[in-house]
């Protein structure tokens, strides 16, 4: 948290300087290390903003699920209900049926305390309500109340939606947390790629400028030697062609560097007036990752594993739901309470009370479905078998991919060392070849070959550094573990909610 606050204050200070500089229409140059670029990307990039909000959406979805497991108090009311109709009644004196006009206004208000029963899949509620009825055109008013009533609604077919949700929702939220952390490490890898893309573009420009200066010098020397007959015309033309190609290469390198800087600025959230000078991280940690430990951490922490686990749960849920809903459907409804009717509102809550109770079971069962239920169940089971097979294969592929990435990463440190030595050797070789050309001991072909080797070795060194750091953050993304500090990346994410 201290590092985050420091970075925020540094960024605000920088943005203030940036704003002053923009007013003056001048470019602002700033040096940036790889670690600083990664922290800025996590703090203010669009990708970071999207990942944080996806996590927050999952967080609130999980909060909603947890709230659904708690009792909920609800108000239900019908303030005014007007009804005018004709209905059939039996005359109590004659016993004959006749139609009478009925016109009334009613009102109702009630409270209910509801609790989902996760163990059984039912719903238990405690309710209280009162109703008012008045016939239009008369002063007849009556009230009825149910001061308290306990009600139970319970499916009897075996499918429990709450039980499956209690399995899935915590798993999905845990997956969301780990996905967020994995996305942050993926963002780190992306930062490395864009950072070194800019470094490579700067190296290419420096190479192009050096090559142009050397080509100009060598071309002038070649013209002098051509005048005294020690350089042939085709060699002189070759030197001139190298000079022209060097000018073209320098122009292209300038354009590529501008594009790379624009991409880096956009990624980190800076405007085009900022010129970022990336500092090459020549020092790399002496780090070898144990493949068995990394594989164990990956299976424990990687969100893909949780996603596969959730897929199996959903497949089993689908089978249970299909069995329960395609055959016999049975529901139990029961209530027990007290009620009272009166023409005076003050009396509807005064004893004595009457009983308010009920018990009912509803059944719904297919008699002839021509094998529909059997087909649906078999299809659900087949889908479950396919999911189980695909999950097993996905886990095998996942483990193999983790091991291969660890093995590749463990070779990267050696590759960086080799590339650094090759760059040094190529620089020394080019210096020697250039000096020998200056005293007319080697020809243009060998000089060009030495220069090409030097260019390739510099680019190879930068690429090896980029590969090392990208591999490092891929390992962190897979395992959610910092092997440098030997600590887990799974931390509290409450600071997101503070924003």
Image (cartoon, helix red, strand yellow):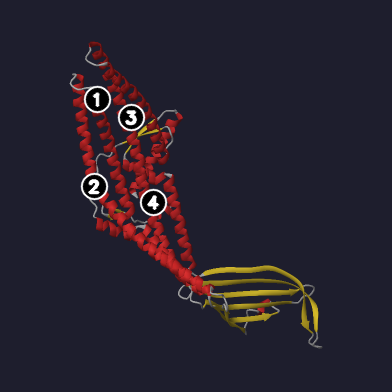
**Residue at horizontal 36%, vertical 25%?**
248
Front tag of 1 and 2: 1
Per the image, the residue denoted by label 3 is 205
- Mark 3 crowd level (few <14, some 14–19, many ≥20, 10 Å Cα): many
- Is 220 left, or right, of 29 in this rendering? left
| Residue under pointer 2 | 411
Q: Earlier in the sequence, mark 4 or mark 3?
A: 4
Crowd class of label 2 (few under 14; some 14 to 19; many from 20; radius 10 Å): few
> SS of the residue at dot 3?
helix
Q: Which mark is residue 183?
A: 4
* Residue hosting label 1: 445
Place residue 32 in its image quadrant.
top left
Mark whose residue sits in front, 1 or 4:
1
In which quarter of the view is residue 443 placed? top left
Q: CA distance from mark 4 to mark 2?
A: 25 Å
- Mark found first going from the N terminus, 2 or 3: 3
Marker count (numbered):
4
């Amino acid at each position: 948290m201290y590092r985050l606050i420091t970075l925020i204050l540094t960024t605000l200070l920088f943005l203030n300087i940036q704003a002053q500089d923009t007013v003056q229409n001048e470019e602002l140059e700033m040096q940036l290390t790889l670690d600083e670029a990664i922290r800025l990307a996590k703090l203010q990039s669009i990708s970071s903003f999207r990942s944080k909000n996806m996590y927050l959406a999952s967080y609130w979805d999980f909060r909603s699920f947890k709230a659904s497991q708690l009792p909920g108090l609800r108000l239900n009311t019908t303030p005014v209900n007007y009804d005018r109709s004709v209905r059939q009644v039996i005359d109590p004196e004659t016993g004959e049926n006749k139609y009478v006009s009925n016109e009334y206004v009613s009102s109702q208000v009630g409270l209910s305390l509801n609790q989902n029963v996760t163990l059984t899949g039912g719903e238990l509620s405690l309710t209280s309500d009162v109703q008012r009825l008045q016939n239009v055109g008369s002063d007849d008013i009556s009230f009825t109340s149910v001061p308290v009533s306990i009600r139970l609604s319970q499916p009897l077919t075996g499918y429990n939606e709450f039980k499956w949700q209690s399995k899935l929702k915590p798993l999905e939220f845990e997956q969301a947390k780990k996905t967020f952390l994995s996305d942050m490490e993926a963002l780190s890898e992306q930062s490395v790629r864009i950072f070194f893309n800019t470094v490579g573009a700067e190296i290419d420009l420096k190479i192009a400028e050096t090559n142009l200066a050397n080509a100009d010098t060598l071309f002038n020397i070649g013209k002098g030697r051509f005048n005294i007959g020690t350089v042939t015309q085709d060699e002189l033309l070759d030197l001139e062609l190298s000079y022209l190609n060097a000018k073209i290469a320098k122009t292209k390198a300038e354009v590529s560097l501008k594009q790379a800087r624009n991409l880096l600025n956009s990624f980190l959230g800076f405007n085009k007036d900022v010129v970022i000078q990336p500092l090459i991280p020549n020092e790399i940690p002496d780090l070898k990752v144990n493949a068995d430990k990394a594989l164990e951490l990956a299976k424990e922490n990687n969100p893909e594993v949780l996603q596969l686990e959730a897929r199996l749960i959903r497949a089993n849920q689908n089978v249970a739901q299909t069995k329960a809903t395609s055959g016999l459907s049975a529901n139990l409804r029961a209530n027990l309470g007290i009620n009272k009717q009166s023409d005076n509102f003050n009396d509807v809550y005064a004893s004595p009370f009457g009983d308010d109770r009920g018990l009912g079971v509803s059944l719904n069962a297919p008699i002839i479905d021509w094998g529909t239920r059997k087909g649906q169940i078999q299809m659900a089971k087949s889908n479950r078998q396919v999911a189980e097979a695909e999950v097993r294969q996905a886990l095998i592929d996942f483990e193999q991919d983790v091991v291969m990435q660890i093995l590749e990463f463990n070779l990267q440190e050696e590759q960086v060392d080799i590339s650094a030595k090759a760059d040094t050797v190529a620089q020394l070789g080019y210096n020697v070849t250039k000096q020998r050309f200056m005293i007319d001991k080697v020809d243009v072909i060998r000089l060009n070959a030495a220069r090409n080797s030097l260019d390739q070795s510099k680019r190879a060194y930068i690429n090896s550094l980029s590969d090392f750091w990208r591999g490092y953050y891929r390992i962190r993304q897979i395992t959610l573990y910092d092997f440098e500090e030997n600590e887990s990346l799974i931390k509290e994410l409450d600071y997101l909610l503070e924003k």
